Amino acid sequence: MDKDEIICPVCGRSQNIYKVSQIYLESLTIFDKNSPHPIFDEMFGEAGKDLYPLPSRYGHDFTRTFSPPSGRAEWFRPIHPDIFIFVFTVLIAFFLYSIYAQQPSIVYPFLIILGVAFIVYFAFRKKLVSRYQAEVAEGKNSFVSVDLAVARWMKLYYCAKEGLVFDPETKTSAALDEMKKYLLKA
Ligand SMILES: [Zn+2]
């Protein structure tokens, strides 16, 4: 596709539009090299051109800003309450064991508190599990797979004038620092 055909849906200009995947790949090749580069020389522009400020083109932050969404999309995956309680119980068991080794007598009040905590948990477990299931269902509907997000990333362009990324097909856009969220959103 000819670069000149790509028009930013926000400002309607075709100047200072760059392909995101190309910026990313080029940034890997020029990393730490202080040599001139046709794309970056233009992207960072001359003074007075009013282009969107970016982190240094020779640093990791610059590469990361344009990098594709990685496999670490699990951050929005909710944790099953039973797993949470299991981990909590294991940690408490270690904690109580170390107290028991030093001062066996003060372990009993802790055991009573722990027992009450379990009773409270099982009283609310049904509610917590159904809320967890609702979150999982919602997560499936609100996010796309990382594979699809990467495919979307391949089509993205960057408008250096406003510091936003856009998909020329769907004509949707997002701020550069919101790019990953935009790509993963269903
Ligand atoms: Zn624009």
Image (cartoon, rainbow, N blue to C red):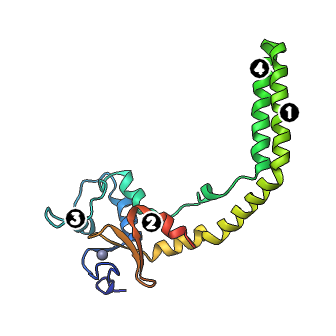
Sequence-earlier tag: 3 or 2: 3
Question: In the rendering, at what x and y percent does residue 137 appear?
Answer: 71, 67
Q: Is label 4 in a helix, a strand or a loop?
A: helix
Residue type for callout 2: Met
Q: CA distance from mark 1 to mark 2?
A: 46 Å
Q: Earlier in the sequence, mark 4 or mark 3?
A: 3
- CA gap between label 4 and label 3 equals 61 Å
Q: Under 8 Å from ligand 1: the CB of mark 4?
A: no
- The amino acid marked with disc number 4 is Ser
Q: Which residue is mark 4?
A: 98
Q: Relative to 49, is 109 on the left or the right?
A: right
How far apart are the alpha carbons under marks 1 and 4? 18 Å
In the image, residue 21 above or below residue 104:
below
Q: Amino acid at mark 1?
A: Gly
Name the mark nearer the viewer: 1 or 2.
1
Eye-nearest disc, 3 or 2:
2
Residue shown at 80% from the left, 16% from the top: 106
* Image-quadrant location for residue 163: bottom left
Distance in Å between CA atoms under marks 3 and 2: 23 Å
**Which residue does the numbered mark 3 point to in the structure image?**
41
Residue 69 lies, in percent from the top left, at 52, 63
Identified by mark 3, the residue type is Asp
Does residue 159 appear left or right of residue 174 in this picture? left
Report crowding for label 4: few under 14, some 14 to 19, many 20 or more residues within 10 A (C-alpha): few
When asked about the image quadrant of residue 73, the answer is bottom right
* Element carrying mark 1: helix
